[in-house]
Image: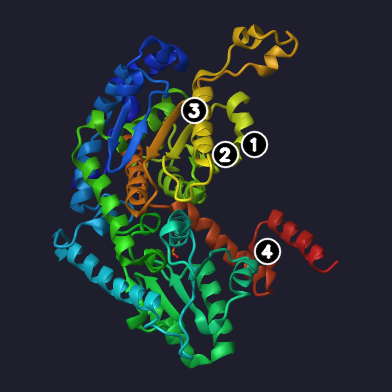
Amino acid sequence: MTGLLTSPDPAANPIWAKLTAAAAVVPDIRALLDADQDRPVRSTVSAAGITLDFARQRITPESLTALIELADQQGVFIRRAAMFAGEHINITEDRAVLHTALRLPRGSSLVVDGVDVAAEVHQVLDRMGSFAKAVRNGKWRGATGKRITAVVNIGIGGSDLGPAMAYEALRAFSKRGMTFRFVSNVDPTDISEAIGDLDPARTLFVIASKTFSTLETMTNGRAARSWLVDALGEKAVSKHFVAVSSNSELVEAFGIDRDNMFGFWDWVGGRYSMDAAIGLSTMIAVGPKGFASMLAGFHAMDKHFETEPAPRNLPVIMGLLAVWNRDFLNISTNAVLPYSQYLSRFPAYLQQLTMESNGKAVRLDGTPVTYQTGAIVWGEPGTNGQHSFYQLIHQGTSPVACDIIVVAQSDNPLGDQQNMLIANALAQAAVLARGRTLAEVTADGTDLALAPHKVMPGNRPTSVISTARLDPFTLGALIALYEHSVFVQGALWGINSFDQWGVELGKKVALGILAVIEGQAEPSSIDSATVHSIAVIAEQFAP
Ligand code: F6P
């Protein structure tokens, strides 16, 4: 247990210096590919319906082996076992990190801190299942006896991004005829636009908040409550509001009774909670069976991560490549480019998962890191991004590592559009890796003055992550792949991937500023630049 409170400095490990030297002389990606015709086959690994092809990463097999050795010496695999066993690896909050327990198959047992968490997980899943079924088949009705046809999830961060992403991703499996909306922003526009055209008598609100104290969610929740009560009266609340939270006292204080609450536990981090009760809206959309299939996909990737030897282990390889790109190739950003419209919200989901987890600058013992940690993650679906920011990826001065996600089969086959989509994904992977030299540009007689503008440096490290079909199972596996990759990176860096202290100060300061804006506190209680900004905005408010 004490071994989990600290982690050796990776930069002080002799392997780190060896990797630094290797990175200084690593051939470019085109040379790596041309020198070894077997590289693509050797660099392709599959598990749980997901295939990772990392042939276009700028790394030699020797360096990957050295990274595995480094991970081993840094205790990454010991920490992995500790996570699965429910030890308190989130040391700053003294909590277990057990999202993997959320997807243990029925009948499993995992006793943590004296409690069988697997049994508790299935009790909640069963309650969610009965409720979701009743809403879907019309047994659960609104206060006036009408069927529920719209579900509005109100939450933010992990209580929004996962459900919103999963709903988009699994639209092909969702109950058509029902409307699903996701409200997160405290901007009054969000809730107003989300509910403006809905019928209160047919609307169910899911208030999703682990703490049940998040300003945005509580504010939007109260606005929704007033909207409903104005239309249907106070008594209607119990038929139109359910809560998902780990804080039953605050749920009751809000006016939702415990029977309408679905709980989860402090060992589920917000950004790891979409497969806990936070996924209630997902379950209503895809049904309890679809949700179970998603959990099975998560679990299949968990098992792979837990047991597969490192050289064939997808999350281990992906996590180590991320460390290599960040620390040894000095690439600060990672674009996630899903060639699937259904995955349009996946980059936003991954932003929280990766950046809230690994955007940290001190090690477990509180000492500053002397190396780089989490990359900046962003992205948009292909092919849209190609007509927007890919220019910078191809020819800009900041190298970007890319994840190209390909779904082989479309749920909406239309002419040869799916072939076009896949051809574009693979074309981008090829160009990002190989680029186009000056000799190649001029070979077709391109004017010499124009030629430099057409040269493509290539050498952008790219992984192609593919799956046969995007369904609940493969979505679960894909998310778990990224979750565990994040874990590997954080464990190697020796940081705590499971807290998020960096988001607290802004929340506190906002309350102080609100008090000044509303005349309940003196401007002297806040800094002068903010006082000035308030004055500027006040003028715009009432010119
Ligand atoms: O502000 C960050 C955060 O704490 C996230 O980690 C979390 O997902 C989000 O806020 C929402 O928190 P809650 O579910 O408690 O409302």
Find disc 3 in the rendering and name its residue: 429
Residue lying at 34% horizontally and 51% vertically, measured from the top left: 476
User: In the rendered view, would you say 415 is above or below 257?
Assistant: above
Find disc 1 in the rendering and name its residue: 387
Dot 4: what SS?
helix
Residue 524, label in figure:
4
* Marks 1,2: beta carbons within 8 A: yes
Disc 2 Cβ-to-ligand 1 distance below 8 Å: no
Q: In which quarter of the image is ligand 1?
A: bottom left
- Apparent side of residue 97 relative to residue 342 in the rendered image (left or right): left
Residue lying at 73% horizontally and 57% vertically, measured from the top left: 533
The disc labelled 2 sits on which kind of residue?
A: Thr
Query: How far apart are labels 3 and 2 at the CA level?
Result: 12 Å
Residue 448, label in figure:
none
Residue 343 in the image: state x and y as whole percent. 48, 49
Please identify, in this view, whether the residue under mark 4 or under mark 3 is nearer the observer.
3
Find disc 2 in the rendering and name its residue: 383
Please identify, in this view, whether the residue under mark 2 or under mark 4 is nearer the observer.
2
Work out whether residue 237 or residue 139 is closer to the camera in this orientation and state it: 139
Dot 2: what SS?
loop
* Marks 4,1: beta carbons within 8 A: no
The disc labelled 3 sits on which kind of residue?
A: Ala
N-terminal of the pair, mark 1 or mark 3, is 1
- Apparent side of residue 456 relative to residue 137 in the rendered image (left or right): right
